[in-house]
Amino acid sequence: MLIRLDKFLADTGYGTRSNVKQFIKKNAVLVDNVKVTKPDVKVDTEKTVVSVNGKEVRFEEFEYYMMNKPAGVISASNDEREKTVVDLISEKKRRDLFPVGRLDRDTVGLLIITNDGKLSQKLLAPGKHVEKVYLVKVTGKLDEEDVKAFSEGLDIGDEKLTKPAGLSILEVYEAGKDAGTEKASSEEIYEDKCMSTEFITEAHVTLTEGRFHQVKRMFEARGHEVIFLKRLSMGSLKLDEKLSEGEYRRLTPEEITSLRGGI
């Protein structure tokens, strides 16, 4: 692919086009071992060798990351006041990364971060019915009536009922006697919510759509409050258990191929 030199450098993490032009003016940029002074020089992203201050620059059209999103960080590309999930990726080269879909501030778990717009659209398109699985803890006791209601669709205040969703009850236990599974990263918030209930139910929820605060609203419609929510998978991609909250890694070529092929 042929692109301008200033775009090549901007897309590989060297700042804005204005920043890049300063590098070029200072004779810090070589193209195939030749100094260049014009930002509009065309370079082949697959063949041309570009270096800045003696360091070769590798061009990647797309970057793909899996993150275990921590609580307290917003799912956005940038924000003037708050830290975003993209801010957490220190090794990023691209300046156009964004999260695929959103997790609420207090929700943790699997988040795909990329600049591949086509893949994002396919993963989020309502007609693709891409499954998303969550681990949830709610106040009170869930039962088979709740499982049936989820499978039939729920009225959460929108024009249409939710699409049928899977609800699998894992365990019911007394509040204060945590079953040993993960708590929210903010222990204080978790404990405060536990104080308002006698029992807690852990369950898996499987959705094929992504409405605003959907999981929380579905349980509210059944009289339960979500006190912990973690996304475990999206399509073929499962959260790497080795990633602690706030950690991330690049997707493997096999994972990328599987995501693309499974849509």
Image (tube, rainbow, N blue to C red):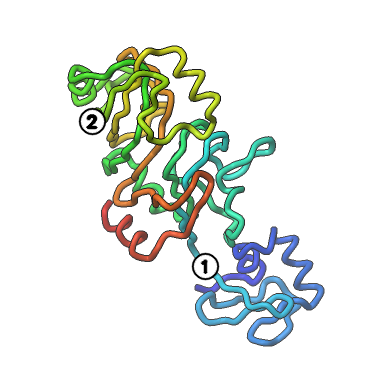
- Specify whether 263 is left or right of 21: left
Secondary structure at numbered mark 2: strand
Secondary structure at numbered mark 1: loop
Q: How far from the left and from the top, in percent, is residue 257?
A: 32, 62
Point 27% across, 35% down: residue: 206
Mark 1 or mark 2: name the one nearer the start of the chain: 1
Q: Residue furthest bottom?
A: 33
Mark 1 neighbour density, 10 Å: few (under 14) some (14–19) many (20 or more): few
Could you say which is closer to the camera, residue 57 or residue 66? 66
Could you say which is closer to the camera, residue 234 or residue 145? 145
- Any part of residue 90 in sight: yes
Q: How far from the left and from the top, in percent, is residue 103?
A: 46, 36
Residue assigned mark 2: 168
Choose top left, top right, bottom left or bottom right for residue 232: top left
Point 29% across, 29% down: residue: 203
Q: Residue furthest front?
A: 177
Residue type indicated by callout 2: Ser
Choose top left, top right, bottom left or bottom right for residue 9: bottom right
Residue type indicated by callout 1: Glu
